[in-house]
Amino acid sequence: MVRFSVVSFAPPGSSLAVIGSSASLGKWSLEKAVTMKPRLANARLQSEPDFHWADVDIPEAGSERIEYKFVERGSDGVKWEELGGHQNRVLELETQEDGQAILLPVVRFAEPGGGESDHTARFYQGVKERGEISIRKVLDQLFVGSCPRHRSHIDQLKSLGISVVVNFQTEEDCKRNCVSGIGMEEDPMAVSRIYDSKGMQYIWMPTFDMSTDGRAQMLPQASFLFGQLIRRGHTVYSHCNAGVGRSVAAACGYLTFFLGLSLRQMQHVMASSRPVAYFDFEAMERARPHYQALFGVEEFLEKDGKCKEEALALL
């Protein structure tokens, strides 16, 4: 059993499917393509992508070369991925984990553009223009999302049981993307007084945006911090500007360095919870030895085990 997963900005009402050269994938027949399930569906924000997946039994896997790609089906017809010189994806399987379906990498629906800045801007400009906050639950005690823009957004965080807010924005980010009407444009720390008044803890860990170096430097400390806060019963909200890169990286570090998920397991847990997530695997690999040198491998507590079980249940 193989799990295909793709993130797509396809408009509401569209469906995604996986199609390929094997009989299990329809032998390139659109009528026999395997329809995928959306994670957010109608719960998506207007500019938010969705995570789509399908588990497919492929008995031919391993005995023949299998090519595939994703297609989007909507009211305007069928849209195929644009893979450039590589016309199709090739099925490459890794070891099956814990009796689950074999997890393929979570990919973005291939189309022109697609870099980190394009991916982030496509989602975030709409959120910013509409003055929204985008909050997604990863685990019961861990949420990831965009920056609060109104006092009501902080009230919303409070209503979700969030007790600690960790902000990865730089000072300049805070001035341009801030809670309106409280003076953050002049004093980025002004927001801390709002959190204090709500009985919430606020932690500011400024990290360069769209920077592998910045994320690699931040990851060991942030991962360990998240683990200790969650152990003590806190519910953490991790945010930057968009909730796509820096705040996602910190949550990914917690899932891998602290809870021990594999990179592939972590990617599926995070992408299914926060489809717009950008994964900086280079930063993760560079941060891992520093995490181990600083914090080692701690005794795995019952609390950690329950969090890991909750994460794996999402696979």
Image: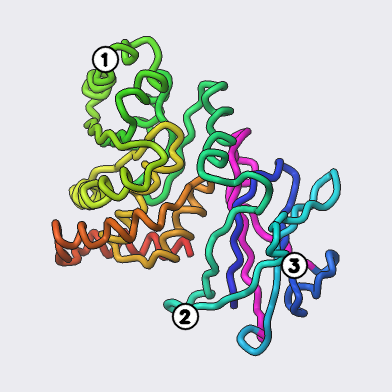
Instruction: Say whether residue 231 is left or right of residue 216.
Output: left
- Earlier residue among tags 2 and 3: 3
Distance between mark 2 and mark 3 Cα atoms: 23 Å
Decide: few, some or many residues near mark 3? Use Cα within 10 Å; few <14, some 14-19, many ≥20: many
Distance between mark 3 and mark 1 Cα atoms: 53 Å
Question: Who's the residue at 41% across and 60% down the image?
Answer: 266
Instruction: Say whether residue 5 is left or right of residue 145.
Output: right
Question: Who's the residue at 77% across and 55% down the image?
Answer: 80
Judging depth in this view, the residue of 198 and 101 nearest the camera is 101
- Residue 173 visible in this rendered orientation of the protein: yes
Q: Is residue 296 above or below residue 191?
A: below
- Earlier residue among tags 1 and 2: 2
Examine the structure image and report whether residue 154 is included in the region drawn in magenta. no
Judging depth in this view, the residue of 33 and 162 nearest the camera is 33
Residue 19: assigned label: 3
User: What's the residue type where badge 1 is placed?
Assistant: Asp
Question: Who's the residue at 57% across and 76% down the image?
Answer: 92
Extent of the magenta region = 33-60
